[in-house]
Image (cartoon, grey):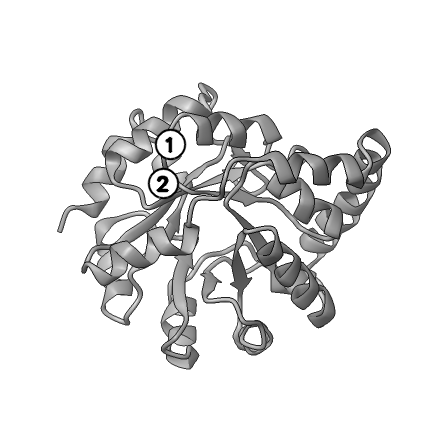
Amino acid sequence: MSKLPSILAEIVARKRQEVSRRQARMPRHELEQQSHARSPARGFVEAINNKVISGRNAVIAEIKKASPSAGLIRPDFDPAGIAMQYQQGGAACLSVLTDQHYFQGEDSYLQQARAACELPVLRKDFTVDHYQVVETSALGADAMLLIVAALSDVQLAEFASHANELGLDVLVEVHDEAELERALQLEQRLVGINNRDLHQFETDLATSEKLIKLMPEDRLVVAESGIHSRSDIDRLNNCGINAFLIGEALMRQPDPGAALTALLKP
């Protein structure tokens, strides 16, 4: 694992402290009981794949209140209402930020969003411990994120396997060739290419265009970050990418669902 970008190193260190506090409040065995009692997971990968094989673009529509790079994105924040709008707008799945310190997220936002719609939901957070894998299931999420840059090969393999055992799908996120090589060692179909440079915080769709050429045909690829317009989607379609995670571009609109419908129009 290469040297972490400073912001990611800071987030990971803080997340480990947070996990310790959460474990003190609720022991893992109690979380596991909640996980066993949860409703069945909705197929996250299946929902994306169904859109793609039918010839449509699949969008993971993100519910995000704020971010370190953009600050407060949406002051009038209603996760349930936004989830319903996204479903009506044609989203394949949802992504909900639950990190509190950097994204002003809450676990309850995921639960509110999932209860308000029928879409599968990704818990978007920084996973650094097995405790969070169980927690993600207990919250009712259908998928979880693993960021290759933040984890060792052993952690990636163990967390992914643990998630699958609990019925969760996994989105494995990469930023460059070295991370992609590590991600492909996992038996996880869904690979996200994040176009944001974690050192400079700039986005460049050329990252997706470059890495898709190295992707095996059996992987389902999601382009993340920097997707703002129909022309961005068309550009990525041209290199063979048909699934996208889109957040800020939708969250800044008065009606995120209507904005998504407009993006999906040919």
The image shows residue 100, relative to residue 219, as above or below, that is above
Residue 224: give x, y in percent of width and height.
Answer: 43, 55
Q: Circle 1 sits in a helix, a strand or a loop, which is it?
A: loop
The answer to whether any part of residue 36 appears in the image is: yes
* Residue highlighted by disc 1: 252
* Residue highlighted by disc 2: 249
Q: Quadrant of residue 105?
A: top right
Residue 137: give x, y in percent of width and height.
Answer: 60, 42
Q: Amino acid at mark 1?
A: Arg
Tell me the crowding category of disc 2: few under 14, some 14 to 19, or many 20 or more residues within 10 angstroms, Cα based: some
Residue 147: give x, y in percent of width and height.
Answer: 60, 59
* Quadrant placement of the N terminus: bottom right
At 41% from the left and 79% from the top, the residue drawn is 216
Tell me the crowding category of disc 1: few under 14, some 14 to 19, or many 20 or more residues within 10 angstroms, Cα based: some
Residue 172 left/right relative to 128: left
Q: Nearer the viewer, residue 242 or 167?
A: 167
Q: Nearer the viewer, residue 84 or 248?
A: 84
